[in-house]
Amino acid sequence: MELLPGVEAIGSIPAIHVRRLRAVVIADTHLGFEEEAARQGFFVPRIQLARTLEVLGRALDETGADWVIFAGDVKHCFSRLLRSEREELSRVFSYLVKERGVRVTVVRGNHDNYLSLVAKDYGVEIVNELYEKGVLIIHGHKKPQGNYPGPVEVVIMGHEHPSLRLRDKLGYVAKLPAFLVAPYPRLGANLVVLPAVGQYQTGTTVSLSPETYLSPILREEIDLRKIKPYVLAEELGVLEFPELELLEDLLAEIQI
């Protein structure tokens, strides 16, 4: 499904294909989350690595892309490089670079401290922002810096981990990950917010209240009424919804 011209959701996975760049873009894998949770006394199944490899494999198989771009927060721990992070980052970068032969770029997120200690061994480039052919890729914890060599047509970010609350016919409420698409007037562009790959990062419930969002971009620079959600439902694929201004009375009661 096209989210914007030349920017496509890939099946029902949290990844997009940017045709003009021949690139797959994903965000917020949060590798190492399970070890950090265990350090705080919470023991959860180790699924982040398997999920990341599954998403990357499916995305590359379905698109034939030769570039993988991480829109930040590849790893989880702020203050150090955990043993599991080193191992899992090595596994992911080795898979992409050595097995799939693709170029890999990481747009630095607020969790990506010490990432370079592993990335350098695989020739993975790390940047604060990535501008290429009218596409600007950022993490989203900061506003874009500006001063790009050309016009910005599309901005792609992560950080927010957006989800939409949906209620089924039996009354069960599920929080499902979603892409968000909206005009970005300050840059004269369109914004795409990516859902998190990490299974434990359910993130922000989409609403019309600025204070519920993490990113200063969504809180301060986007008309929330104009956000259009595209929900990832594994059995149903990608579900396109109207703009939030048309869903105001239904955001907690949408039925599937």
Image (cartoon, grey):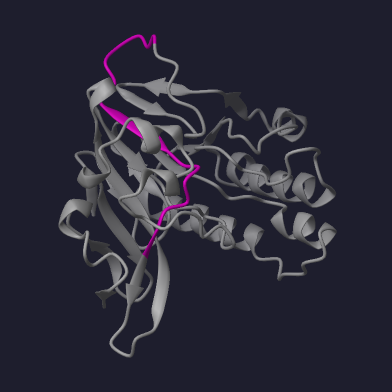
Residue 205 versus residue 241: which sits nearer the camera? 205
Q: Which residues are magenta?
A: 147-164
In the rendered image, the vertical position of residue 126 relative to residue 219, given as above or below: above
On screen, residue 186 above or below 10: above
The C terminus lies in quadrant: bottom left
What residue is at 49 percent from the left and 23 percent from the top?
129
| Residue that appears at 33% across and 78% down | 167
Q: Nearer the viewer, residue 10 or 170?
A: 170
Q: Main secondary structure of the magenta part?
A: loop
151 within the magenta span:
yes
Q: Position of residue 201 (x, y in %)?
A: 56, 57
Residue at (73% x, 60% y) in the render:
34
For residue 121, side relative to residue 238 (left or right): right
Q: Front-most of 159 and 105?
A: 159
Q: Quadrant of the N terminus?
A: bottom left
On the image, the x and y values in percent for residue 125 come to 60, 26
Classify residue 178 by image quadrant: bottom left
Q: Is residue 70 magenta?
A: no
Name which residue lies at 82% across and 65% down: 41
Image quarter for residue 166?
Answer: bottom left
Q: Is residue 121 left or right of residue 225?
A: right
Q: Is residue 239 left or right of residue 178?
A: left
Residue 23: percent from left, percent from top: 40, 37
- The picture places residue 90, in percent across and down from the top left corner, at 73, 44
Count of picture labels: 0
